[in-house]
Image (cartoon, coloured by chain):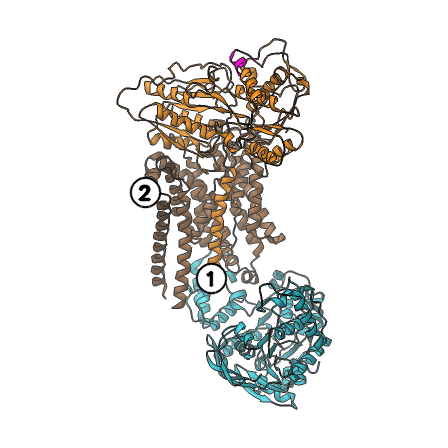
Amino acid sequence: MKSKRIWFVLSFVLLLTLLMSACQPAATPTQAPQPTQPPAEPQPTQPPAEPQPTQPPAEPEEFIFGMLLVGPYNDRGWSQAHYDAGLYVEEKVPGAKLIYIDKVNPADRPGTTPEQLAEDLLSKGAKLIIFNSDDMKDGAINFARAHPDVPVIHASGDTSWKEGVNYIEFPKFGNTMGRMEYGKMIAGCAAALTTKTGQIGYLGPLINDETRRLTASAYLGAKYCYEKYAGKNPADLKFKVTWIGFWFNIPGFTADPTQVADDFLNSGYDVVISGIDTTEALVQASKARAAGKEVWAIPYDYEGACAEAPEVCLGVPYFNWGPAYLRAVEQVKAGTFQSYFEWLGPDWTDINNHDTSAVGFVFGDALSADAKANVEKFIAELAGGLNLFVGPLNYQDGTPFLAEGEVATDLQVWYLPQLLEGMEGQSVPSE
Amino acid sequence: MMKTSSRWSGIGFQTLAVLLALAFTTVVMLISGADPIQVYQNIISGALGSPTKIADILVAWTPLLLATAGLLLTFTAGLWNIGIEGQITLGAIFTTWALRLLQPTDLPPTLIMTIGFVAGALGGMIWAALVGLLKIYGNVNEIFGGLGLNFVATALTIWLIFGPWKRPGVGSMSGTEPFPLELWLPTLSGFRLSPLALAMGIIAIAIVYILLRGTYFGLRLKAVGRNGRAAFLMGIPTTRYMLMAFLLCGLMAGLAGATQVLAVYHRLIPSISSGYGFLGMMVAMLVNYQALWAAPVALFFAALNIGSIQLPIVLKLDSSLSGVLQGSLVLFVLLMDGVRRRLTRNQ
Amino acid sequence: MKVELIHIHKHFGAVHANNDINLTVESGKIQGILGENGAGKSTLMKILSGYIQADSGEIRLDGKPVKINSPSDAIRLGIGMLHQDPLDFPPMRVVDNLLIGHDGSLFPNRREVVRAFNELQNQFGFSIDPYAYVDTLTVGERQQLEILRLLWLGARVLILDEPTTGISASQKEKLFETLRRLAAQGMSVIFVSHKLEDVEFLCDRIAVFRKGELVGEVNPPYVTDELVKMMFGRVISLEEKRRYETCDVSFHLDHVTIEDYRLQIRDINLSVSCGEVIGLAGMEGSGQVQFLRTCAGLMRPVAGEINLGGRRLTGKPYRAFLEAGIAYVPASRMEEGLIPGLSLTEHFILAEEQNGFFINFDKALATTRQRIEDFNIKGTPVSTVESLSGGNQQRALLAMLRHPVNLLLLEHPTRGLDIESAIWIWGKLKERCKQGTSIIFTSADLEEILQYSDRILVFYGGKVSPPIDAESTTVEQLGQLIGGKGF
């Protein structure tokens, strides 16, 4: 009897341990960018410092900066892009040392809060704390409240944007975000120049201002190139968004991205653009290709994403946080760090320049030479000042968004309340 | 009779178990290429390094105490209330719900928060009652019922966060819109610790201690747990007592959820229970279901959790190492208990 | 095959389950083993078939000493045992059931097996579909299957443990015919039963067991009275009985029918007077327990009325019976009566009426000390019940009974106790009777029943005898009734 009970208890504890560990990966988010608000100005509002690390004195003095990463540091997505930026700073600034805690989310670190973890970084000597996810917005704010003198950066946030709706005045609170709209336009263009069926699918995450904006950008890029470079009627282009409900698959809650991607590929959508953190679109396209279908995909977030299935990858738009963090570190060292908000565009002279460009686009092997030439022309046009958020543009429901010739302000782009006319898919989350 | 000698051998085996758990954890560290001494140093400094850290330990201790206190009751009644995680979650959901409803009203914040606590307790009780009713009337083992309801609670949380309670225009893992500052449970200035929540945890464990030690209720619960059939034949309404154990445990779990919302996160987040329910089960098993020891052991577990936060920063080790230590402690203590029983029986 | 069991001893703790058993079974014979429950029959058969090992003694097969350490040893040596509940594997097909345990090639030839099986069962006139699922077979068919399986495995000694329980009359007939035919083919058959008529009808020779010993062997023609006497021991002269008068709180069963998944007992009528003792006799499993539990309110009768002193209890929950002053003391003390891990004091607190919210430990301690003294319990107030001996546990159980009790229902009140304790306990019970408590109890010990009961009910195969006056009956008469004769 007794020993039976002991065995029961033992196996129960084992089960419990398994459960506890099993529960965690289920929600391990490779958190995606979620700049809910980052608004207007294309040029940095504040950062006056030079992006080049020109002035370090001879003896490298140790400078520790801390980073809270929402996902694993090697997630080949959002968090890795930040982590790589940290390494970039270490490389550029002698004596700089990155300390970080990854998987900062309630599922992986139950019972902790970002501000608490930030304090741990602080106690280990960090002079600058970077919160890398929109999810940590509250934590970043709480931390800044408790430690107003410690320089803080909240990537993708808008707390320090004076014109923004969430402005809170802090002395040393920076926000930074890349203008991924351009990356998505280029992705849309590449898709439009590749599709044979004239149908593009967009694997969307959840619905919010940012994702509407990015999806619309992809559509605008696609429409523009379909007409201009492919010489086809843009009215014939089908562009459909299916939202799965979150940045990655949560079984039981989100739609299964694998299923959604397959549905696209099996119903005539021969290019799938991914807006989510994980690579289901690419993987499923690769499988469909192996089964003889002529299909392509465009992943997201991470420069090296194409490597998983180069034979179907048209290219990938990605973030490059290095220069922004480098600037911030320089300012902290120089004692000039003050609150700022920045929304950084690509360096049009070379969008893939790691020292200067905040967003980039890497071509994939599957993009044909012709298409590639045209996409390059398109990039040149954008560099030359082409703006696709220009009227006449209507919202999805037909109400006017921009009148003939009217140029959208950054605020209008940022807070895009609906998808655009011509796009298929939900504009607003259903209640 | 042989009481004293068995007590000493008990302590001897317990010590051995602790040493084995430490040895096992050390081996795990060595395998993962870490210097164990450095690791232990880091855990200790991470837990006790500053007043803030110590306050943080108490912050983690509070829900753990509440959960453990509740679980002691269900364990005493012979029930494996694995559904405690869901009960904490439901407590948090109900508290959030109450606060959302009352936030726009003119009611004083203190009253709103009080109602929040009551609602949380209610939420936990409802979820626990479901497990109990499923067991008693549906013949569903409480482990499976609880497990199922845990999943439902998680799904419900996620649905609420991404659905009806989402932040305007946003669906995010970070949870619902935070409550305004006046609805935060007051904390010691400069710390995250809410004395009120802490007091609640301590009172809960004290109540359970008294219940189990000196009342008819506690004794009957014990009888039900140790031999339900005999208890029934003695005239104890066993199903009613089981249900009461579930309800009381749910109440405390619900309060734990409420403190998570009112004192720690100030909103509903996806894994609001933070695993305190499962951790509480480990504490309860480790102390062999004795209320007296539950509080210090829970404090130790909370300290381990806080102390291990720094591991990834300095040593690039996963914080779940503290989980390895906690889990192996429970396993080895139980194992040693079994070994001791076997040895004494053979004598 | 000739089987010899020589000087077999087996102890279970303090119980000497087999005490120097010497038994020889000739090949081609059907050997009957008769005895009441717990007489040691099954123990001996388990030793022979390898399920347990003897402490000492020797087993010889055809004169050769053998060691039987496991059931598979036994079957290899040609000994097959048919259990009370045949050990088959319900969710599989008959043919697969046959293949199991049959060491052959990795990929057995199913068709061949089916052919051989059908040939075998034709010999005995069985008709089991080899492709049927085992759980669809009747108990009798499973038994047939089990016999075939054992033959298939090469058994030359067949042991049957209570094989006639749960099968129909025609199946029994067929079973007996089969056994006779097997014996005729030279097999040894050992037939274990407590049913006099079966044993008398079938067996070539009967060995009678009582209290772990082989009391004697009998050859036909059998004299039933002689067998009964051997089974139950010598008759002890009964102490003089007191008569108790009927009173207002007498207990009545009116046309009660009890039913559970195994048996049904119809139309029981009984009136118990205050202070009267009713003994329930019969082989274990004949319905006494169901009867007691029905009286206790733990089982609902499917028909009839129960009342106590004019208060109708039919269909009421157990607690209502309890409140009416009916107390039930189960036989399995540690499983149903006491709570392991709790002390004597805690037990007495539980048994008392609740008084306030907090327990007054001082008072409880005083009560406990008193009870320990009154009931002569060897233990301290903080002793946990599992640390007590069986006799002391039983005393503790009786000490927990509240006052007053109108009807006391006891399952084997003295089972496992030494004689001294048994006498002491009955003394306490009789004291209660004097105060007006009625008692209904079961016992496997006929002497106990005869000695303490005023009236006796005998249970046999779903039937209950009318109440028999204990003074005007004898052990022999009861023994016959228990064996099913005279119903």
Viewer-nearest residue: C347 or C209: C209
* Residue A215 location (% of width, % of height): 58, 23
Q: Amino acid at mark 2?
A: Asp
Viewer-nearest residue: A92 or B231: A92
The part of the image, by quadrant, that contains residue C378 is bottom left
CA distance for labels 1 and 2: 39 Å
Which region is colored magenta? A379-388
Residue B35's label in the rendered image is: 2
Task: Say left or right for A216 vs B341.
Answer: right
The residue positioned 55% from the left and 53% from the top of the image is B242
Q: Badge 1 is on which residue?
A: A2
**Which quadrant of the rendered structure holds the N terminus of chain C?**
bottom right
**Which quadrant of the rendered structure holds the C terminus of chain C?**
bottom right
- Chain letter for the part of the structure drawn in brown: B
* Residue A324 location (% of width, % of height): 42, 20
Q: Is residue C334 above or below residue C4?
A: above
Helix, strand or loop at mark 1:
helix
The part of the image, by quadrant, that contains residue A296 is top right
* Residue B290 location (% of width, % of height): 43, 53
| Residue sitting at the far top | A405
Q: Can you see residue C13?
A: yes
Task: Say left or right for B62 vs A235.
Answer: left
Colour used to depict chain A in the structure image: orange
Q: Chain of mark 2?
A: B
Q: Amino acid at mark 1?
A: Lys
The part of the image, by quadrant, that contains residue A81 is top left
Colour used to depict chain C in the structure image: cyan
* Residue B105 location (% of width, % of height): 56, 27
Viewer-nearest residue: A349 or A141: A349
Residue C319's label in the rendered image is: none
